[in-house]
Image: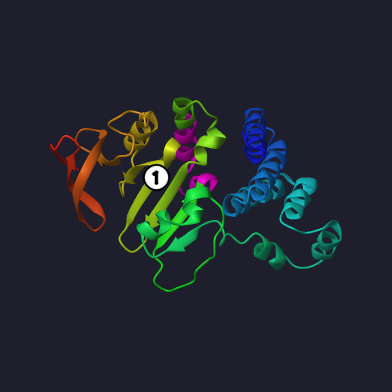
Amino acid sequence: MARDDSAIEAAACAVTDARDRDDRAGEARALSTLGQALLNAHRVGEGRYICRQAEQLAVEVGDRDSDDQVLTVLGLNPKELDELASQDGSWRDFLLDSSEETQWFASFQDARSDEYYKSGFRSNVSYRADLFVELAVGFVTVKFLGPFAEAFATKLGESLGESAARAIGRIRLLRNHRHARTDLDVVLPESTRTTLVLPADFTDAARLAAIDLDLTAEDVRGAELHWDVGAGRWRSVKYALFRDGRALWAGSKAGNLAII
């Protein structure tokens, strides 16, 4: 295992341990360490997201040392921290800005062919007006999907025989804000991609069924999956008819039609 991966997994375990002990100050410090490990691995979007979580928690519990640790991770030295402490809070908002957590593209295809999608490493950021697809990678998916993303990654790690921290690094969330479609991609070993097209009403039933999916199964691995409300299950599809980003019907790999 690469050194960066080991540091990320150790820090993620420390976060879990602190949460289990209900040690919020310890969790803030562990999150800061995790953010540092992600930044060291050039996973900038994820690292900054985790650092923001650490900073917010440190402020909530009044842990100045943890707060300073996060800001140091983000590039401020002790002298700069002392100087900024005497100023208003606008500098903090600038430093902790979330604009680098995700990246924007013109299409799903552009997003999936970018280095950021493949590895989580930052590439050149574009600011064109026609960018509608927002891509979140790894830990940042928790920002949009909440505890579901963590539970999904934990179960995925179990099925692949790896840690939840490594498994969450396989997850990409693509949101087309123009067509109201959201895809949850899982990049499996050998670069096989399985996609869950998340319904607009992502119910508890759909979430639990997604967590229970065996993404290594032959009929699921590498497929596009849609939620079948009537059957209460995810179906593997080969093609689909869409209206406003929602699948109206789809053909399964076996060729059978399923109402979505």
Q: In which quarter of the image is the N terminus?
A: top right
Q: Position of residue 36 (x, y in %)?
A: 69, 47
| Structural crowding at the residue carrying mark 1, measured as other residues with C-alpha within 10 Å and reported as few (<14), some (14–19) or many (≥20) | many
Residue shown at the point (33%, 40%) measured from the top left: 203
* Quarter where residue 14 is shown: top right
Q: Pointer 1: what residue?
A: 185
Task: Please give the range of residues in magenta.
Answer: 138-154
Is 191 contained in the magenta span?
A: no
Q: As displayed, is residue 115 above or below residue 148?
A: below
Q: Position of residue 47 (x, y in %)?
A: 62, 50
Q: Position of residue 80 (x, y in %)?
A: 82, 63
Q: Position of residue 115 (x, y in %)?
A: 50, 55
Q: In which quarter of the image is the C terminus?
A: top left
Main SS of the magenta segment? Answer: helix
Label 1 SS: strand
Residue shown at the point (71%, 50%) measured from the top left: 59
**Amino acid type, mark 1:** Asp
- Residue 90 shows in the view: yes
Residue shown at the point (26%, 33%) measured from the top left: 233
Q: Which residue lies furthest to the bottom in this view?
A: 129
Q: Judge left or right: residue 102 versus residue 258.
A: right
Q: Judge left or right: residue 257 versus residue 155.
A: left
Residue shown at the point (20%, 47%) measured from the top left: 239
